[in-house]
Every structure is written in structure tokens, then in C-alpha cells.
Image (tube, rainbow, N blue to C red):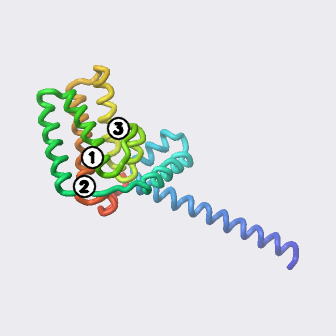
Amino acid sequence: MSQTALIVAAIIIVALIGAGVLFMQRRRSEHLQSRFGPEYERTVDQAGSRRKAESELADREKRVEKFHIRQLDPATRRGFMERWAEVQARFVEDPPRAVMFADALLAEVMTARGYPVKDFEQRASDISVNYPSVVEHYRTAHEIAVRESRGEASTEDLRRAMIHYRALFEELVREEMPAEREPEPAH
């Protein structure tokens, strides 16, 4: 084979490898966008680049794959639902404590489902893998709870926190696991 033919073959091979890499990157991006929905864009904004964000999101997936996420048995589910009803009823008389109890109850539900609950940011990141459409509710509710701890939240803020907490609570106590449901369309 002539030297020119070897050079052309090498160029073709490099081009094919490059095309393959681009194809794989595009598929990865599409997968992450589909899986994380609005959380994808939030992470891109926060990370400052798609590459960093996609690496972080892929790391989240790998981390959560190692967890033993499980469904709640019917009795445990009922118990959590009864406690949630009590938390909501408490809101009428004591909104700040109701928000505090809602946050604590969500941590208990997450633990029962198999999520570690060490710190808030890690919890939100872990939850975003299976519940990307409601993780922003969780962040908003938590932010209001933090403001309340400093005496900076109004009763209306606390009401909104309860609504946001309820969105995640309802997802976590559903009977089917997230993977068993149809994926939600990206907005």
C-alpha cells in the first residue's frame, strides 16, 4: 500500500472515530435531557457548561444506581399518609412548625425508600435522578423553611412551602416506582 493510501486510510479512521465520539456525546446529552427535564437546564446554568453539567448528572445517576430504592409497603405508605394529613392539619394552628414537620417527614419517607439523607443538597441531587419534575418543589420548600428559621418567611410563604413539599411527598408515596411510570415529556 502506498504512503498516500495509508494517510487517506488514517484520515478516514480518525474521522470515523470523531464521528462516533460526537454521536455518543449527542446520545448522552439527549438521554440526560430526557431523564432530568428542567433539572438538566438548571444544572447547566449552575455548572456553567454543558460538559460539566452532564458529568455531574451522569455521576448522580451512577450514585443513585447503587442505592437500594424500594417501594413502601402498604402499611408504611398509609402511616406516612396519615402523618402527612396531621402535618397539614397542624398548619392551621402553627404554620412554622407544620413546615418543619413536613421537611422532617419527607426525610423519613426518603429514608424508608432507600435514599440517604445526610445533607439537603445531596438529598436534592439524589432525588432529582428519579423525580426530576418535582425536585425544584423540594428546593423551593426547603429555601422557605430556611428563611422561616431566620424569621423571614410570611404565612403565605409557609403555605407555598407546604404545597411544594406536598408535590414531592405525593411522588414519594406513590405505589409504583418512578421507573415503572411512563417518562414525563420534556418541557
- List the residue tagged with mark 3: 139
Neighbor class of circle 2 (other Cα within 10 Å; few <14, some 14-19, many 20+) is many
Helix, strand or loop under label 2: loop
Could you say which quadrant of the image residue 180 lies in?
A: bottom left
- List the residue tagged with mark 1: 109
Which residue does the image show at 45% across and 54% down from the upper left?
61
Of 96 and 40, the residue lying toward us: 96
Find residue 80 and report its horizontal and vertical position in percent. 19, 46
Of 79 and 176, the residue lying toward us: 79
C-alpha gap between disc 3 and disc 2 = 23 Å
Does 86 appear above or below 51?
above
Of 6 and 164, the residue lying toward us: 164
- What type is the residue that disc 1 sits on? Val
- State the residue lying farthest toward the top: 151
Helix, strand or loop under label 3: helix
- What type is the residue that disc 3 sits on? Arg
Of 91 and 76, the residue lying toward us: 76
- What type is the residue that disc 2 sits on? Leu
Q: Are marks 1 and 2 in contact (CB under 8 Å)?
A: yes
